[in-house]
Image (tube, rainbow, N blue to C red):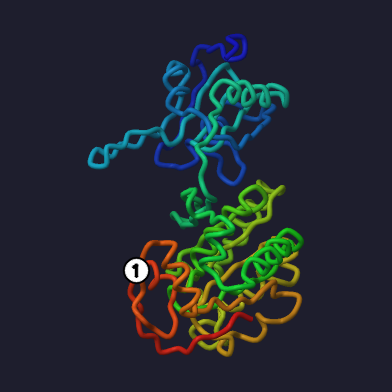
């Protein structure tokens, strides 16, 4: 890195902040961290952000004297020792904040802020190992929503042969048409229906890998589904839309039966939130694509969610017939006991289970 760009200056600026505050390290809804606000006061302040994987450990080691704030995680039992968030100060008004997947430069001119991140990226950028897709796990901390990036294994992206072995005839064409719709639509609802073990989650993982260049995925755990109806959640989505304007935002709701079933006293808010987010003026503003996996049947879904224009797709994942199941089992080097039909989970486990619900064909 060029010394002229990263020369340190004496720490003669009073930088005070509450170390328990997350804004000590990373921007809060696009606002600079506390130490940077303290340094610039009412003076000119410009920010440049770059999403990039970089060699965090080497950057800290080689710029230790410039390290102004840091958050380091030690987990002795797991043998883990790593930096999570850092702030470097390279000049009186030149700062760089970073975590493992991004860096943000701050300076008193637009050009200087851009130079900070581009120079740093040129020195410390790394080529990530080949992986599958990834998603943002959403959680709430205090009064704010946070994202944790979760990377999937490369094996979650299925080859054409593996895909055709796992899913019945016609699934490949449906998948291609679905992907085309997700490229063409800015908002809408998709419902993936099927009994447990029929491959809905595996398909979603494959979808994340297939669309990782153009779509940004978010996962809300079933236990936190009530997030959808919280007023401050809208602000979170608005911020994400602003930061990732070049990507389509996709929300994954797994086991979302309560959020799609006919409205009653115990799920009124969740269904209403889903209706508002997937269509209407709020849907136009946030531009969210929502994918729900469910175990209930189409007859139990609130009919307003199935309205043409709101619904992108509704797909039923069925159990495999014996011929198809035997081909998959043979590719795995296993032999199945005789049964009327099989779920993917049963084939991979090598043991069929009794299910109460009859087989349903693909719609």
For the residue pair 80 and 360, the one nearer the viewer reads as 360
Residue 186 in picture, x, y percent from top left: 73, 61
Please name the residue shown 60% across and 73% down the image.
169
Tell me: residue 354, above or below residue 314: below
- State the residue position of label 1: 349
Question: How many labels, in total?
Answer: 1
Please name the residue shown 59% across and 32% down the image.
104
Where residue 303 sits, quadrant-wise, is bottom right
Q: Residue furthest left?
A: 77
Where residue 363 sits, quadrant-wise, is bottom right
Check the picture and name the quadrant holding the N terminus. top right
Tell me: residue 286, above or below residue 15: below
The 10 Å Cα crowd at callout 1, few under 14, some 14 to 19, many 20 or more, is few
Please name the residue shown 42% across and 68% down the image.
329
Q: Is residue 300 left or right of residue 336?
A: right
Residue 276 in picture, x, y percent from top left: 67, 72
* Residue 293 in view here: yes
């Amino acid at each position: 890195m060029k010394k002229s760009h990263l020369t340190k200056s004496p720490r003669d600026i009073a930088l005070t902040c509450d170390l328990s505050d997350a804004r000590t390290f990373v921007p809060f809804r696009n606002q600079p961290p506390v130490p940077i606000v303290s340094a610039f006061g009412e003076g000119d302040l410009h920010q440049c952000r770059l999403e990039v994987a970089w060699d965090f450990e080497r950057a800290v080691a080689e710029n230790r004297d410039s390290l102004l704030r840091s958050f380091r995680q030690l987990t002795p039992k797991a043998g883990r020792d790593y930096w999570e968030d850092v702030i470097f100060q390279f000049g009186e008004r030149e700062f760089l904040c970073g975590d493992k997947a991004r860096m943000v430069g701050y300076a008193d001119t637009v050009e200087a802020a851009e130079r900070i991140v581009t120079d740093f990226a040129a020195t410390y950028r790394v080529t990530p190992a080949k992986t599958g897709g990834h998603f943002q796990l959403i959680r709430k901390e205090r009064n704010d929503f946070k994202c944790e990036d979760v990377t999937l294994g490369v094996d979650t992206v299925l080859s054409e042969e593996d895909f055709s072995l796992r899913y019945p005839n016609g699934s490949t064409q449906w998948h291609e048409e679905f992907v085309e719709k997700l490229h063409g639509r800015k908002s809408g609802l998709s419902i993936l229906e099927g009994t447990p073990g029929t491959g809905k989650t595996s398909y979603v993982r494959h979808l994340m890998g297939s669309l990782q260049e153009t779509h940004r995925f978010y996962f809300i755990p079933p236990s936190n589904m009530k997030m959808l109806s919280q007023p401050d959640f809208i602000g979170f989505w608005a911020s994400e839309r602003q930061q990732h304007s070049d990507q389509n935002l996709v929300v994954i709701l797994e086991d979302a039966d309560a959020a799609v079933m006919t409205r009653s006293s115990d799920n009124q808010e969740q269904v209403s939130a889903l209706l508002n987010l997937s269509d209407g003026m709020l849907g136009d503003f946030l531009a969210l694509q929502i994918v729900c996996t469910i175990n209930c049947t189409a007859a139990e879904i609130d009919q307003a969610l199935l309205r043409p224009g709101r619904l992108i797709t509704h797909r039923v994942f069925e159990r495999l017939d014996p011929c198809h199941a035997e081909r998959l089992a043979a590719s795995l080097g296993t032999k199945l006991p005789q049964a009327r039909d099989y779920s993917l989970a049963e084939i991979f486990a090598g043991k069929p289970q009794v299910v109460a619900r009859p087989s349903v064909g693909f719609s």
